[in-house]
Amino acid sequence: MNAQPPAYRPASLPEMPLPEWLVLAILSQQHAHGFAVAQLTASGGDLGRVWQIPKAVVYRAIGRLLDAGLIVPEGTEPGLGPQRTVYAATEDGRAAAEHWLHEPVEHVREIRSELLLKLALLNRAGVDPAGLLRAQRAVLEPLVGAIESRGAGSQGFDATLLAWRRANAVAALEFIDIITPAQPRQP
């Protein structure tokens, strides 16, 4: 499947921490109960190998997403144990999650958590990440240039800190280059 992001763009994305975005994105891709989401984000889970979210944080995120009107209960899942409420993203929740999934991260430090989660979620949905990767490169290139220009006259620990930041930003660009799908040549 090679789905493109929807044309709808919310005026502004809600301010939410990463666990809430992750839970919303999961529920926008598949209806699930909190325990199933917690299993995905646990240490052995498909998404937990990128970034782990404790079960209590998953359930707190579900409560906040319900309060925000971004998810709704769809029913309960029968079973021998306690009944589990199955949740699904609302239309606004799906649109917000889809928009968030295709937005580049603002800081190099968010590559390890947020960008990798977005890439994992896009992969789970069978969506080509090329647009996100191009947008991420466009964010990182000016950062590398700014760091390099500031580093020219730096001394002492400032030079050390700028060298660290430059090395991380350049490594992030190299990472993006490695995983960006090759563009077909135009005749």
Image (cartoon, rainbow, N blue to C red):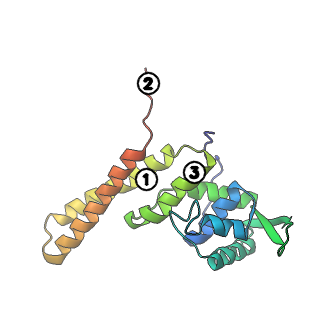
Instruction: Name which of mark 1 and mark 2 comes first in the sequence.
Output: 1
Q: Which residue is depicted at the point 18% across and 77% down?
A: 157
Q: Position of residue 136 (x, y in %)?
A: 43, 53
Residue 4 is left or right of residue 70, and the answer is left
Image quadrant where one finds the N terminus: top right
- Secondary structure state at the residue bearing disc 1: helix
Instruction: Name which of mark 3 and mark 2 comes first in the sequence.
Output: 3
Counting other residues with Cα less than 10 Å from the Cα at mark 1, is it few (<14), some (14-19), or many (20 or more)? many
Residue 126 is left or right of residue 130, and the answer is right
| Amino acid type at image mark 1 | Gln
Q: Position of residue 52 (x, y in %)?
A: 54, 70
Residue 168 vs residue 13, the one in the foreground = 168
Could you tell me if the residues under marks 1 and 2 are in contact, i.e. CB atoms within 8 Å?
Answer: no
Counting other residues with Cα less than 10 Å from the Cα at mark 2, is it few (<14), some (14-19), or many (20 or more)? few
Q: CA distance from mark 1 to mark 3?
A: 15 Å
> Which one is closest to the eye, mark 3 or mark 2?
3
Please give the label number shown on residue 169.
none
Image quadrant where one finds the C terminus: top left
Q: CA distance from mark 1 to mark 2?
A: 23 Å
| Amino acid type at image mark 3 | Leu
Q: Which residue is tagged 1?
A: 136
Q: Which residue is depicted at the point 26% across and 56% down?
A: 145
Could you tell me if the residues under marks 1 and 3 are in contact, i.e. CB atoms within 8 Å?
Answer: no
Please give the label number shown on residue 186.
2
Q: Which residue is tagged 3?
A: 122
| Amino acid type at image mark 2 | Gln
Q: Position of residue 134 (x, y in %)?
A: 44, 46
